[in-house]
Image: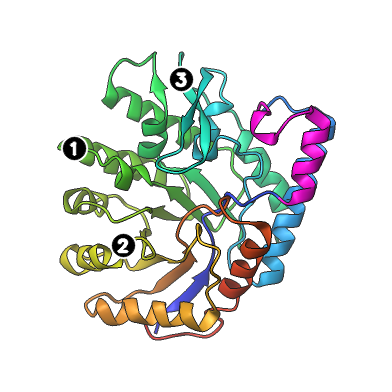
Amino acid sequence: MTEVVTTTPGLFPLPDWTKDELSELKGHQKADLIDGTEGAEIQSVYDRTRGELIERQQAAGLDRVVEGQARWDDMIAHPLAVADAVETRGIVRYYDNNNFYREPVVTDDLAATGDVAAELDSAADRVDSGLQAVLPGPYSLADLATDEHYGDEQAFLGAIAEFLTAELAEFPDVETLFLLEPSLVENPPGDGADQRASEAIDHVAAATDADVVAHTYWGALEEKVYAHLMDADVDAIGFDFVANHEDNIYNINEYGTKSDVALGLVDGQNTLVEDPETIEERIEWVGEQTPSADFETVYATINTETFYLPGNRFEEKLDALGAVGKTEVEA
């Protein structure tokens, strides 16, 4: 029997009222706002938005609640985009989709900003238990950034990992940390770099007492990348079963996985809403296809960030996910 924990990888779509108020305050779209320099009125909008997003997750009955990342205009590049040692330059396509972020260019020694910690402090005031933090994984953050300071890929990845551990040191207590690592799938590291990516993830995971999930998505990991990721001391690896179930099943059966697992079973990019029974059937199907795995905890989650979704569909997916796993299921 397996405990099912319902959660999300964060980065939620903004409510319409938030977009309207931000647009009115700044005279242009939210995507043009400069993170980290907001005035009191804009900070108030984000704070009210944070409260609404948290309350909506609680109303849906999710077991883990995220801050929502409403301020993350630059998607998972956000923690770098607000750093003093980083210049944000031209607009870059976010992987292979119609979303964009400002290119973060590292020009000096990185140091913690406390930006994400401040968001979590505010969220912690609203969440009695089950708070989950979200950060980019070190490999994906390094992949999305440009280095004009450290001069070496290995040194840059190490600096990014140290930057993330310094950010973690300022976090309030959280139960779970999702490290988002889509670049491991989208731009997989080659020989040698795959081991260093795993070591960087391990370094970040060691900096927190929270349960750490290295969540990969938009496909399945190459075999060698996955085998190295298994060496990282994380509590769970996340799999995108929406984008690629066959290769993810293969990796689990061929190389094993952690005692806990995160299953991306709800589509974060499609407006079709899954019902709770379908999600539960998918959890059971994964268990049937991986007979040698004995999962203690299944994090049932949306496969990707959800900022792609219209607000009503996003909320319906939260409700469906929150209704899953209130009792133990076979997996």
Q: SS class of the residue under badge 3?
A: strand
State which mark lies toward you, 3 or 2: 2
Horizontal and vertical percent position of residue 248: 27, 63
Horizontal and vertical percent position of residue 122: 72, 46
Horizontal and vertical percent position of residue 2: 41, 80
The kind of residue on which mark 2 rests is: Asn
User: Marks 3 and 1, Cα distance to the nearest angstrom?
Assistant: 23 Å
Residue on which the image places disc 1: 190
Q: SS class of the residue under badge 2?
A: loop
Q: Which mark is residue 128?
A: none
Would residue 201 be found to the left or right of residue 53 on screen?
Answer: left
Residue on which the image places disc 2: 244
Q: Is residue 165 above or below residue 67?
A: above
Query: Does residue 29 belong to the magenta stretch?
Result: yes
Would residue 23 be found to the left or right of residue 294 on screen?
Answer: right
Q: Nearer the viewer, residue 26 or 135?
A: 26
Horizontal and vertical percent position of residue 23: 77, 35
Residue on which the image places disc 3: 105
Q: Which badge, 3 or 1, is on the more N-terminal residue?
A: 3
State which mark lies toward you, 1 or 2: 2
Q: Nearer the viewer, residue 164 or 272?
A: 272
* Residue 329, picture quadrant: bottom left
Query: What kind of secondary structure does the magenta stretch mostly adopt?
Result: helix
Q: Residues within 10 Å of mark 3 (few under 14, many from 20)?
A: many
Magenta stretch? 15-35
Q: Which badge, 1 or 2, is on the more N-terminal residue?
A: 1
* Residue 242, picture quadrant: bottom left
Residue lying at 72% horizontally and 49% vertically, measured from the top left: 50
